[in-house]
Image (tube, coloured by chain):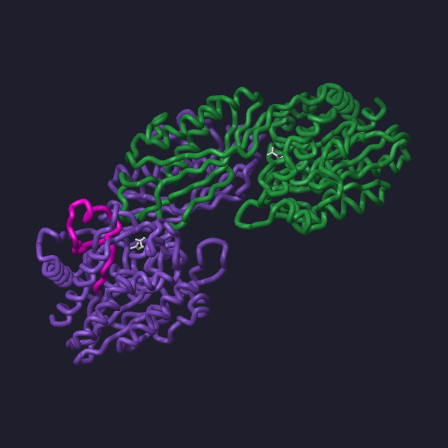
Chain colours: A green, B purple
C-alpha cells in the first residue's frame, strides 16, 4: 500500500480530502507523468531481478526467471488513468504484481516456470480513444497500424506512435502474443461497482465480462442565427442530439443495457449561432451480445426517424416541427462478451477462499468494465480478481478501496499465480 | 460592393462555392485579421478626409467635418464576424458608411454638421461572450472594467484588454457617449431572417428589436464508470442536460419565444466516464420583456424539478429513475426590448420609399437579433435599415445578400444620414 500511494506522485490528480493520499489521479497514457511511472516500474522490477521487455505498443513485460524456460505466468494491469481518475483502477493490479515479485524474493521462492508482471499501455482509452488498445494489438485483434495512428482526444495532434517515440517507449519487440507469449494472465482490479460492498463480501471471482460497443454519432443540421431564425425554420443539431441522448437512455432502460454519452463537440460553438453540427460518443454495454445487437439496430432505426422529424415516445410533443437533419454513425469499438478460462477461474476461487478463510466472502461476478484480460483471454488462460469499491465509484478522484481489501486482493493474486505455475 | 468583397481578404472563412466571393468569414474580434480590417478602415477613412478617434474599447469613430461644429450623425455597425460567419453581417453596415463618405466627397457635398462612420468592437460576442459589448460600454450600460476583463471563449487566456493592447487599439479616449457624443446613429444591416425575401420587399424599416437574455447553466452530477454503474446509480449530467435542452425548446414553443443552446462543455469529457459536470449556454429571445420574464421563471422552476428527479411533460417516461443532480444559473446578459426613435424611423421610411420608388417595397419590422443600435438608442436618436437575407440565413458562411440589395441599403443609409443632418 505504501508503494502504491508513493507512485501516485506521478500524475497526482484532484484533491478531494485533506489526507495525504486523498487525491485522485490524472496520468493520461504516454504523457510525461505516465513516463515517470513507467521508468519507476522498469527500474523497480529490474532491481527485483526481472528481465524487462518493451514492445512496439509500449507494453512493459517484467519477467522473473523460473527453474525452467517456458512462457511466464503473468500478473498484469495498467498504470494509466482517466483524466479525473482514482488511485486504484489499474494501478492496484500492477503494484500488486510488483509486490508479488517482492514477496517471492523475500521468501526466496523458486517458481517452476518464469512469472512476470505486465503494464499494458492506454487501457483507459481516455487519451487515445480505444480502450485496452495495446493488449488488443498484442492479441492480434487490433492492427498495429491503427493503434499507432490513433490521435489523442481533443485538439492536440499527437498520435500513439509519436508519443511512444517521444517518451522513449516504442520498443523493438513486436507487439504480439507470438513474440511475447504468456502461460496465463491474472488481473487484480477494483470492482468499480457496488456489489461486493453491498453484500459485504471481500473477493469477486470474475467469470465473465460484458460486451460493449463504442460509437461516434455525427448530427448535421444548419447553422443559423439564434435571434432571427424561427423555431420552425431551424435544423438545430444540439436539440436533435438532446432527443437522441434521451432516447438512447430509454432504449438502454428497455433492454437492460447501459448507454452513456461522455464526450460532445458542438460546432461552431458560439452562443448566438444554432449549432450546425454535433459529434458525440455513445458507450453501450450489456452482458449478452444479442442485447447489443438489438440496442444497435433500434438506435440506428430510431435516430434516423427522429432526425427526419418523426416523433418517438412523445419526445417531440410540445415542441416545434423543424427542418430535417441527418445522422451518421461510426463504430469505434465492438467487443463481444467474454467468458474467462474455467481453470483460471477455479484457481482464483480456490485462492480467494483460502485467503479470506470463507466461501461466503467470495462470489462469482461479471465485469461491467472492459479489461486487458478480455484480450489476453483470447490467447492464454485468463481470469480476474475483484476487490470492493467504496460506493461503487470509479473513474472519479474519490475512488477508494481500503488498504485491507487491497492486501487481500494482492494475496489472492500471488496465490493464483503460484497455483497456476504449479499446475 | 467591390470594396466590401475586397476587404473580405481580412479573415476569409470557409469556402462554400467556386466563385471568387463564395466564402464565408472568420474574423473574430481583436484577432490579427480584425486588426487588418481595422487598419484598412482607419487608413481609408483618413484618406477620405476624416478625423479618426479610437476609444478605450477599440471603437473607431471616423468623422467628416460639416459646416458647423456639433455631435456628428453616424452610420455604424461592426467589422467582426462569427467564427463561421458570412460577408454581410455587420460588414455591410460599415462598408456602406465608407461608401457614403466616398459619395459625399465625389459630389463635394457639404453637410450642416459633421457626419461619421463608427466601427463597434466585438458586436458578435463570439470571441468575448457579451454581444455589442463595446457599444454597451459607450452607452454606459456595461462597466468598462467588466468588458476589459472579459475572457475569450474556449481555452485561451486572452482578455479584451490584453487583445486591444496587443493589436494597438486600446485608445486614449474614454469609451463613453459623453466623450464621443452622437447626434444620431443609423445602421444598415442584413435582415438575417426570411421575411423580406418571402414578401419580395426590398427594405425593412426597423421599429423595434426583441428582448434577449443569455444564461450559462451548470449541471452537477457525479462522475462514474460507464460500464460498471447501473442506470439507477447514476447522476448523469449529460442526460439531465438533454432533458433541460428539450424542455427549454418546449417552453419556447409554448411562449412564442426562441431558445437555443449554442455551446456546451462536458467534464471530464472521456468516452467511458459518465459526465459529472456540464455547462451550457441558453440564448432566449422574444419581442416582449414579459414573455422573457415568464420563460425565465418557468425554466428556473422546471430545471430544478427535473434535476431533483421529477418528471415534466413525460420526459422521464421510459427512463430509469436515477440520483438527484443540481442546476445553477448565471445570467450573462439581459437586454430589454427596444423601440427605436420615431423621428429616425420616419426618416428611414421616407428614404426607403424614395430609393425604391414604392411604398409596397418597404415594411416596418422587428429585429430578431441584437445590434449596436440597441445601445446607441439609449443615448441618441437611432434606427436601422434591413435588406433581404437569402433563405433567411446568417451566422453561416453561405449568408448572402445580392449586390443590388446591398446598393439599395447603402442608398437608404446615405439618404437617412443626410435627411437627419438637414433636420
Ligand atoms: N476497467 C476500466 O475502467 N477500464 C476502462 C475500460 C472500460 O471502459 O471498460
Ligand atoms: N446582428 C447580429 O447577428 N448580432 C449578434 C448579436 C445577436 O446575437 O443578436
Instruction: Please report the residue visible at 67 percent of the width from the left and 29 percent of the height from the top.
Output: A375
Q: How many marks?
A: 0
Instruction: Please report the residue visible at 36 percent of the width from the left and 40 percent of the height from the top.
Output: A221
Q: Quadrant of residue A202?
A: top right
Q: Quadrant of the C terminus of chain B?
A: bottom left
* Bounds of the magenta segment: B186-210
Q: Is residue B401 above or below residue A138?
A: below
Residue B181 in percent (x, y) is at: 25, 72
Residue A221 appears in view: yes
Q: Is residue A137 magenta?
A: no
**Is residue B221 rendered to the left or right of residue A376?**
left
Q: Is residue B200 magenta?
A: yes
Q: Quadrant of residue A395?
A: top right
Closest to the observer, A159 or A208: A159
Closest to the observer, A422 or B192: B192
Q: Quadrant of the N terminus of chain B?
A: bottom left
Amino acid at each position: 500500500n505504501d508503494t502504491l500511494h508513493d507512485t501516485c506522485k506521478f500524475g497526482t490528480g484532484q484533491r478531494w480530502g485533506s489526507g495525504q493520499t486523498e487525491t485522485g489521479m490524472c496520468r493520461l497514457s504516454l504523457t510525461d507523468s505516465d513516463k515517470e511511472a513507467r521508468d519507476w516500474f522498469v527500474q523497480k522490477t529490474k532491481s527485483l531481478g526481472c528481465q524487462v521487455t518493451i514492445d512496439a505498443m509500449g507494453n512493459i513485460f517484467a519477467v522473473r526467471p523460473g527453474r525452467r524456460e517456458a512462457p511466464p505466468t503473468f500478473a498484469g494491469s495498467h498504470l494509466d488513468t482517466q483524466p479525473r481518475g482514482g488511485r486504484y483502477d489499474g494501478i492496484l493490479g500492477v503494484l500488486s504484481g510488483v509486490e508479488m515479485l517482492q514477496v517471492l524474493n523475500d521468501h526466496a521462492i523458486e517458481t517452476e516456470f518464469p512469472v512476470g508482471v505486465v503494464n499494458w499501455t492506454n487501457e483507459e482509452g481516455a487519451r487515445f480513444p480505444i480502450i485496452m488498445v495495446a493488449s488488443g494489438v498484442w492479441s492480434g485483434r487490433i492492427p498495429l497500424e491503427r493503434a499507432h495512428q490513433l490521435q489523442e482526444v481533443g485538439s492536440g495532434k499527437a498520435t500513439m506512435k509519436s508519443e511512444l517515440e517521444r517518451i522513449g517507449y516504442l520498443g523493438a519487440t513486436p507487439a504480439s502474443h507470438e513474440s511475447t507469449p504468456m502461460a496465463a494472465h491474472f488481473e487484480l482490479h477494483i470492482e468499480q461497482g457496488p456489489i461486493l460492498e453491498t453484500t459485504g463480501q471481500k473477493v469477486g471471482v470474475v467469470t465473465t465480462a460484458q460486451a460493449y460497443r463504442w460509437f461516434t454519432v455525427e448530427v448535421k443540421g444548419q447553422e443559423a442565427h439564434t435571434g432571427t431564425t424561427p423555431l420552425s425554420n431551424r435544423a438545430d443539431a444540439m436539440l436533435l442530439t438532446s432527443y437522441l441522448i434521451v432516447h438512447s437512455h430509454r432504449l438502454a432502460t428497455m433492454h437492460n443495457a447501459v448507454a452513456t454519452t461522455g464526450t460532445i463537440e458542438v460546432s461552431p460553438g458560439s452562443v448566438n449561432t444554432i449549432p450546425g453540427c454535433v459529434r458525440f460518443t455513445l458507450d453501450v454495454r450489456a452482458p449478452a451480445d444479442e442485447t447489443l445487437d438489438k440496442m444497435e439496430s433500434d438506435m440506428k432505426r430510431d435516430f434516423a426517424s427522429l432526425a427526419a422529424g418523426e416523433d418517438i415516445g412523445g419526445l417531440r410533443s410540445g415542441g416545434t416541427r423543424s427542418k430535417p437533419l441527418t445522422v451518421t454513425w461510426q463504430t469505434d469499438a465492438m467487443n463481444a462478451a467474454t467468458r474467462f478460462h474455467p481453470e483460471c477461474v477455479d484457481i482464483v476461487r480456490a485462492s480467494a477462499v483460502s485467503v479470506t478463510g470463507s466461501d461466503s466472502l467470495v462470489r462469482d461476478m461479471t465485469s461491467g468494465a472492459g479489461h486487458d484480460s478480455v484480450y489476453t483471454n483470447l490467447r492464454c488462460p485468463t481470469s480476474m480478481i475483484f476487490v470492493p469499491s467504496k460506493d461503487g465509484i470509479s473513474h472519479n478522484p474519490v475512488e477508494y478501496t481500503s488498504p485491507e481489501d487491497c492486501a487481500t486482493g494482492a494475496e489472492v493474486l500471488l496465490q493464483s499465480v503460484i497455483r497456476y505455475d504449479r499446475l
